[in-house]
Image (cartoon, coloured by chain):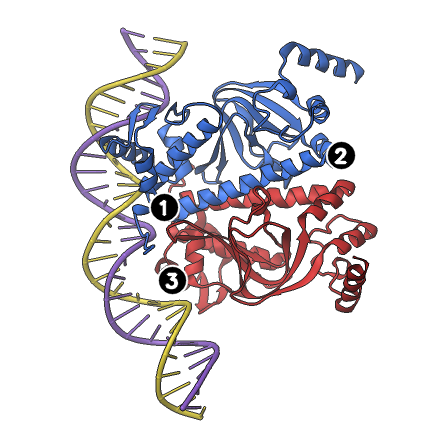
Chain colours: A red, B blue, C purple, D yellow
DNA sequence: CGAACCCTTGAGTCGGTTCAAAGCAGGTGG
DNA sequence: CCACCTGCTTTGAACCGACTCAAGGGTTCG
């Protein structure tokens, strides 16, 4: 046990991949913690787990042990219905968490797949709970993260339940833009890490529809698309797509 | 402060609406707590808040203070898009929780409306967090409840993204059935508490479609409908509707 | 008893899917 | 270095499921 701890410390020193040195502090768990508390968190987090493109971080049915934070890379999570239908439930970029679905039953209920080589921090949940009992700021933040996931899902439900194809795509692009922005990247030009089919699965559309709408947006000068490379040319117009497409009987 | 506490205690004694005497213990927060812990929870929960049919428990934009548990009655929660479109994000019956969306921003992000006169327990969140720091079983259960909401939402996303109208209705009815069952009521005959329009809003369908599918199910002998009164005549066939309606290339 | 609301049913329309074919990029091996 | 292959994307044409619009009947409650 002691040797394992020592190993861990050395590993931490070498890689410098500790929370206290992490650029994502402001987005991730350490938010609002003081240095001493971050240090305690550091000892709990198992940094530096690599997941190669196409590999699973976990699959539905795996026993639950940890939450995961994306340090770098890009993941999707998806639920699989008995009959083979797959629904992508989310895309996850650095600073975001996955695995919270598994807390309820101690079993993962969806798959998490890396869409590009990804660097993952693993946070054993029992230990996190323990720690959050003595660090109220951490406790609160954990609750906020779970709550944020619920709010996000409600947004997707609204999208899937009430929006037309063009509104869905516009919402999707603006959401990506905003998230890249928040991480210090360009919000107006970025690479999509997922296929048209995966976008469609997330938005409740077929891949052909996604492709057609992209083409239409491009014709209209809202965006420019070249394969996975997207440029948002007219953000205001994209925003205007949402809501005007239909209904909108706001007198 | 002291007088307020005394008032509260008296109120508790009189109404007997305390967690320790509540029939929903096994579904609600007290699950897994020992009597002493339940007693501590009792002092925190503000029992007996009445919400009349049609009234709001809270609305989007209200400041967040508490989680709510449904003691009796029936609620819906819904998000409102800027342009007036409404999406019902859930129906809530006794033993279920609402308000968790508000933790992330300290502001409620959706409305909660009573569909019939409802009896609500209010749990001030700061106090609940405090208590859960010293009662691990409570902490874990709170996490499970939030996680369960996330899993539920993923299920709805699958439904909205990939299912046809008939599958959605079948899923909806079977889900209600299962929840009534778990509460000791009949799982094969019950009253719907919501309108066709609200069902449609939840399932991403128009009210006319809901009505038509109900009629079709009735013709086929799967259910019988009389207004809001539903009887499930052939549960197996209802289950078979899901997945067979389309795709299902599970050779 | 009347008004407001809810539900059902029909006919026509349309958005997104399905099916099909062809173009394109990126990687592999000869 | 080119040829090939595989997986991804685009585009077209036909189809269909759910929506829209509309009218009529039922229920509930003041």
Callouts 3 and 2 on one subunit: no
Q: Which residue is mark 3?
A: A211
The residues tagged by marks 1 and 2 sit, at their Cα atoms, a distance apart of 44 Å
**The C terminus of chain B is located in which quarter?**
bottom left
Instruction: Identify the disc placed on residue B134.
Output: 2
Residue B212 percent coordinates (x, y): 27, 34
Please identify the quarter of the rendering in which residue B122 is found: top right
Helix or strand or loop: what does disc 1 sit on?
A: loop
Tell me the distance, in whole angstroms, between the alpha carbons under discs 3 and 2. 53 Å
Query: Height in image: A38 above or below B92?
Result: below
Kindly identify which chain the residue marked by label 2 belongs to. B
| Element assignment for label 3 | helix
Return the x and y of residue A114 as percentages of the image width and height: 54, 62
Q: Report how far apart the C-alphas of labels 3 and 1 lie in the structure.
A: 21 Å
Q: Residue furthest toward the front?
A: A1
Q: Is residue B209 left or right of residue A7?
A: left
Q: Nearer the viewer, mark 1 or mark 2?
A: 2
The chain identifier of the residue carrying mark 1 reads B
Residue sitting nearer the eye, B136 or A208: B136
Q: Find out whether the residues at labels 3 and 2 contact each other: C-beta distance under 8 Å.
A: no
Q: Nearer the viewer, residue B86 or B102?
A: B102
Q: Which residue sits furthest right?
A: A36
Q: Which residue is mark 1?
A: B163
Label 2: few (<14), some or many (≥20) within 10 Å?
Answer: few
Q: Measuring 70% from the left and 51% from the top, which residue is drawn there?
A: A29
Instruction: Tell me where residue A72 appears, x and y as whole percent.
Output: 63, 63
Would residue B111 appear left or right of B164 to someone viewing this image? right
């Amino acid at each position: 046990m002691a040797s394992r701890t020592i190993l861990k410390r050395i590993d931490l020193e070498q890689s410098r991949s500790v929370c206290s040195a992490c650029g994502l502090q402001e987005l991730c768990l350490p938010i609002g913690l003081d240095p001493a508390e971050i240090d305690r968190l550091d000892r709990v987090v198992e940094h530096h787990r690599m997941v190669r493109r196409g590999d699973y971080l976990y699959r539905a049915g795996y026993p639950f042990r940890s939450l995961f934070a994306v340090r770098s890379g890009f993941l999707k999570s998806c639920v699989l219905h008995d009959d083979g239908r797959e629904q992508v439930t989310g895309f996850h970029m650095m600073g975001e968490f996955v695995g919270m679905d598994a807390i309820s039953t101690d079993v993962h209920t969806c798959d998490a797949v890396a869409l590009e080589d990804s660097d993952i921090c693993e946070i054993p949940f029992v230990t996190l709970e323990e720690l959050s009992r003595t660090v109220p700021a951490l406790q609160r933040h954990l609750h906020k993260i779970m709550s944020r996931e619920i709010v996000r899902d409600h947004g997707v439900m609204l999208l899937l339940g009430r929006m037309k194809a063009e509104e869905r795509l516009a919402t999707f692009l603006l959401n990506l833009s905003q998230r890249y922005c928040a991480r210090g990247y360009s919000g107006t030009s970025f690479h999509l890490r997922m296929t048209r089919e995966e976008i469609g699965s997330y938005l409740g559309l077929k891949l052909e529809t996604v492709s057609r709408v992209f083409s239409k947006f491009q014709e209209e000068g809202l965006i420019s698309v070249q394969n996975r490379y997207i440029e948002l040319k007219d953000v205001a117009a994209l925003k205007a797509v949402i809501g005007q497409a239909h209904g909108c009987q706001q007198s």
